[in-house]
């Protein structure tokens, strides 16, 4: 379990670190989804991307917490 991170005099909740880690994982994954053509086949691409990002955040939280 991560504790609060501090940058300067500001404390950040661990979920901020989890979201940053997830976005680092999500950006290449999004590129890969676009490259193989999956984003053209889904009904609502931004909604699908949001669902994938939330899933990645959940997995990062599960494995790091």
Image (tube, rainbow, N blue to C red):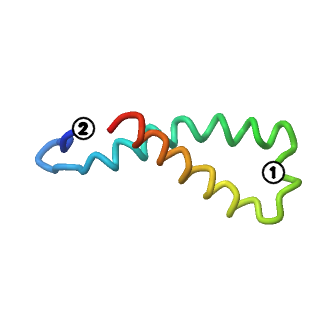
Horizontal relation, residue 40 to residue 12: left or right: right
Residue behind mark 2: 2
How many residues crowd mark 1 within 10 Å: few (<14), some (14–19), many (20+)? some
Q: Which mark is residue 22?
A: none
Q: Which of marks 2 and 1 is in front?
A: 2
Residue 25 in the image: state x and y as whole percent: 55, 35
Name the residue: 45% across, 39% down.
60
Q: Which residue is at 75% across, 35% downward?
A: 32
Residue 49: percent from the left, percent from the top? 66, 54
Q: How many discs mark residues in the rendered view?
A: 2
Asked where in the image residue 20 lies, by quadrant, the reply is top left
Q: What element carries label 2?
A: loop
8, 58: nearer the viewer: 58
Query: Above or below — where is 32 with respect to 47?
Result: above
The N terminus lies in quadrant: top left
Residue matched to label 1? 39
Q: Which quadrant holds the C terminus?
A: top left
Q: In this view, does 9 lie above or below 51?
A: above
Task: Determine the secondary structure under disc 1.
Answer: loop
Disc 2 to disc 1, C-alpha distance: 34 Å
Q: Residue at left 81%, top 51%?
A: 39
In the drawing, does residue 35 fall left or right of residue 64? right
61 displayed left or right of 47 = left
* Residue 27 x, y percent position in the rendering: 61, 40
Can you tell which quarter of the image residue 37 is in? top right
Sequence-earlier tag: 2 or 1: 2
Q: Count residues near mark 2 (Cα–Cα under 10 Å), then give few for <14, some for 14-19, many for 20+.
A: few
Q: Are marks 2 and 1 in contact (CB under 8 Å)?
A: no
What residue is drawn where x is 17% and y is 49%? 11
Residue 19 place in picture, x, y as percent: 42, 47
**Which residue extends farthest left?**
9
């Amino acid at each position: 379990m991560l504790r609060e991170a501090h940058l300067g005099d500001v404390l950040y909740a661990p979920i901020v670190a989890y979201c940053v880690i997830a976005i680092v994982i999500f950006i290449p994954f999004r590129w890969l989804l676009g490259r193989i053509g999956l984003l053209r086949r889904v009904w609502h691409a931004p909604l699908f991307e949001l669902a994938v990002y939330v899933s990645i955040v959940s997995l990062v939280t599960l494995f790091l917490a």
